[in-house]
Amino acid sequence: MDGIGKELIQDISREDISAFLISLKNQKDAKLSISATTTARILVSVRGMFSYALKEKVIINDPSAGIKPPRIGSRLPKAISTQDVTRLLNSLKGDNPSNLRDRAILEFMYATGARISEVVDLDVDDLDLTDNIVVLTGKGNKQRVVPLGSYATKSLEDYLVRGRPALIGIKVESGTSAVFRNVRGGRLSRQSAWNIMGNAAKLAKLENVTPHTLRHSFATHLLEGGADIRIVQELLGHSSVTTTQIYTKVTIEALRHVYSTSHPRARG
């Protein structure tokens, strides 16, 4: 109630709530301003309070009804250039078991656009390196078949022949069918996969690169290369093409940048 300036819930009007939400954004100190997402969550709580008060007959009208939350702008996924992808993939040198594994993971992620959970959950039977395909199990246990490029296939073959057996050894957890193993022979965890990506990005001197960055880059580079959006949707495992369409905005932004910097009459 203090934020709205009224002591009794019965005295709060629709205008009071609207003014309160606006004040959350327009703080004198910019550091104290609240994002649209957080403001929307606060509005949900406010609505819940008034809904309960109405149910208990503390109030006869709900002043929060019909108040729309602030529009939350869609965040464009962050992709890196093909040159930066190459730097990232080439950052891991050496042929010890861990390096073979880490290089195979990065090549696999960029080749397939797989989510990090799909990478660590991958089993040997999911791979067909003869036909260069992999079966990925995504959200809701939905499966999809994704092609493997020659670079990813070669990295996987090197790891499966020379890296994975060394990691398995005679460890207790050697019975697992996981493709990617940790140093104890068990299935690699999500956190370990994140650490592998972070280490590679550091070696490549790239900032703000996460496992999802390669998924974004996979989709963006396919669309920039002329791939049909429906095919990209299938490869990513999106249930709706609407989710995939956000990547078209990324390519449009790239086109605008090239146009504005290259066309002689793009700028005044």
Image (cartoon, rainbow, N blue to C red):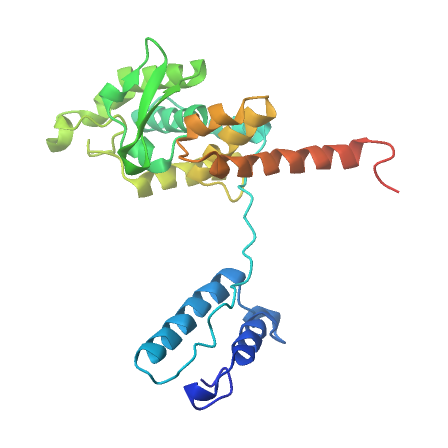
Outermost top residue = 130
Q: Nearer the viewer, residue 133 or 51?
A: 51
The residue drawn where x is 32% and y is 8% is 130
Outermost left residue = 172
Q: Position of residue 152 (x, y in %)?
A: 41, 19
Q: Position of residue 102 (x, y in %)?
A: 37, 29
Vertical side of 79 occupied by 136: above or below:
above
Q: Nearer the viewer, residue 142 or 122?
A: 142
Vertical side of 43 occupied by 263: above or below:
above
Compared across the picture, whether 177 is left or right of 144 comes to left
The residue drawn where x is 40% and y is 35% is 239
Task: Please identify the quarter of the rendering in which residue 153 is found.
Answer: top left
Res. 90 in view:
no
Compared across the picture, whether 132 is left or right of 90 comes to left
Outermost bottom residue = 7
Vertical side of 218 occupied by 199: above or below:
below
The residue drawn where x is 27% and y is 15% is 161
Q: Position of residue 222 (x, y in %)?
A: 54, 25
Compared across the picture, whether 24 is left or right of 96 comes to right
Looking at the rendered image, the quarter that the C terminus falls into is top right
Looking at the rendered image, the quarter that the N terminus falls into is bottom left
Res. 199 in view:
yes
Q: Position of residue 229 (x, y in %)?
A: 52, 27
